[in-house]
Image: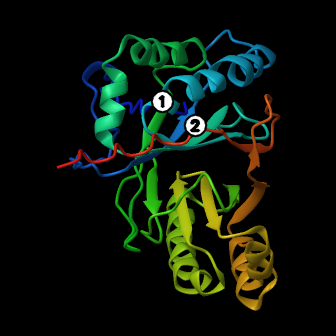
């Protein structure tokens, strides 16, 4: 889920669980470079939904604060989609950001970090769940997307723990073939990148599959989002998207209060980073 980059390679074990490596799509990172990924978690077979929700909300999310929160976890947003687990939808989606890859690896090397990593498999299907690192968006349509595509549309540093984040989930219109859907999505995203930053959009992370469009949109404040969506630009973008997407979820992120319901996006509260050590006196 959330904190653990458990990128799955087809037919292989999770990269990070075995080798402490970044998730699929990551490039070698400097020790001080932030790490960020989008996770899709599919419920383990035999685990009923009420038990999954209870374990996620009351055990796993608090464990995320306790362990990754001490090792550089900068932001963690958790989404429980409506109708999760149906028609290829994951049961849980997360946006995860660490202050550095070095801190992430340090956590994985500790007994509590390893225990935290292993605990997610009490909830999630190891063979189906995966994470992807958003890549720079070029507008070019790839020839293959079996595992999905993740993009950072604007390429700006964003504090996803503050401001106003909206999560969007849309499904391909059934009359469109997946390749047509993906082509339309790429054109739509190019138009979003061209027009919405002028209306305050400063972060846009998206994950695409042949059937679904997942997106985390960041604004400085709720008012900026509302003005943008009511503007001619926002209305034109929504009209364009309606031609190939069925809206399933549009949810503003709320602070975690100990529980999460289907259809909600929550921001996990994290401890502040430690203060820098003062320099030694000469």
Q: Give the vertical position of 229 relative to 265 (above or below).
A: below
Tell which of 46 and 68 is nearer to you. 68
Which residue occupies 52% across, 32% down?
A: 69
Quadrant location of the N terminus in the rendered image: top right
Which residue occupies 61% across, 17% down?
A: 123
Looking at the rendering, which quadrant does residue 162 occupy? bottom right
Image spot of residue 2 (x, y percent): 55, 33
Q: Residues within 10 Å of mark 1 (few under 14, many from 20)?
A: some
Left or right: 156 as drawn, with respect to 239: left
Question: Pointers 2 and 1 in contact (CB under 8 A)?
Answer: yes
Q: Give the vertical position of 148 relative to 41 (above or below).
A: below
Q: How many marks?
A: 2
Can residue 21 be spotted in the picture? Answer: yes
SS class, disc 1: helix
Q: Give the vertical position of 106 relative to 34 (above or below).
A: above
SS class, disc 2: loop
Which residue is the site of mark 2? 271
Which residue occupies 40% across, 15% down?
A: 114
Can residue 90 be spotted in the picture? Answer: no
Which residue is the site of mark 1? 70
Image spot of residue 29 (x, y percent): 24, 48
Left or right: 98 as drawn, with respect to 262: left
Tell which of 246 and 2 is nearer to you. 2
Q: Give the vertical position of 107 relative to 253 (above or below).
A: above
Image spot of residue 56 (x, y percent): 69, 22
């Amino acid at each position: 889920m959330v904190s653990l980059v458990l990128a799955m390679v087809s037919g292989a074990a999770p990269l990070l669980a075995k080798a402490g490596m970044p998730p699929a799509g990551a490039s070698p990172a400097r020790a001080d470079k932030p790490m960020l990924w989008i996770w899709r978690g599919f419920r383990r077979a035999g685990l009923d939904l009420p038990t999954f929700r209870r374990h996620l909300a009351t055990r796993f999310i608090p464990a995320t604060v306790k362990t990754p929160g001490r090792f550089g976890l900068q932001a963690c947003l958790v989404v429980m989609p409506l109708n999760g687990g149906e028609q290829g939808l994951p049961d849980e989606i997360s946006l995860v950001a660490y202050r550095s890859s070095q801190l992430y690896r340090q956590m994985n090397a500790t007994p509590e970090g390893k225990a935290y990593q292993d605990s997610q498999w009490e909830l999630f299907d190891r063979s189906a769940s995966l994470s992807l690192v958003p890549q720079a968006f070029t507008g070019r349509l790839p020839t293959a997307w079996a595992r999905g595509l993740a993009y950072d549309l604007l390429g700006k540093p964003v504090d996803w723990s503050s401001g106003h984040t909206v999560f969007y989930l849309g499904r391909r219109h059934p009359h469109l073939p997946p390749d047509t859907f993906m082509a339309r999505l790429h054109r739509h995203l190019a138009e979003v990148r061209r027009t919405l930053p002028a209306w305050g959009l400063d972060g846009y992370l998206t994950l695409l599959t042949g059937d679904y469009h997942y997106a985390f949109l960041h604004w400085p404040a709720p008012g900026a989002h509302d003005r943008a969506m009511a503007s001619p630009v926002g209305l034109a973008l929504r009209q364009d998207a309606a031609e190939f997407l069925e809206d399933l979820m549009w949810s503003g992120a709320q602070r975690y209060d100990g529980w999460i319901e289907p259809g909600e996006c929550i921001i996990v509260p994290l401890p502040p980073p430690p203060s820098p050590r003062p320099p030694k006196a000469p």
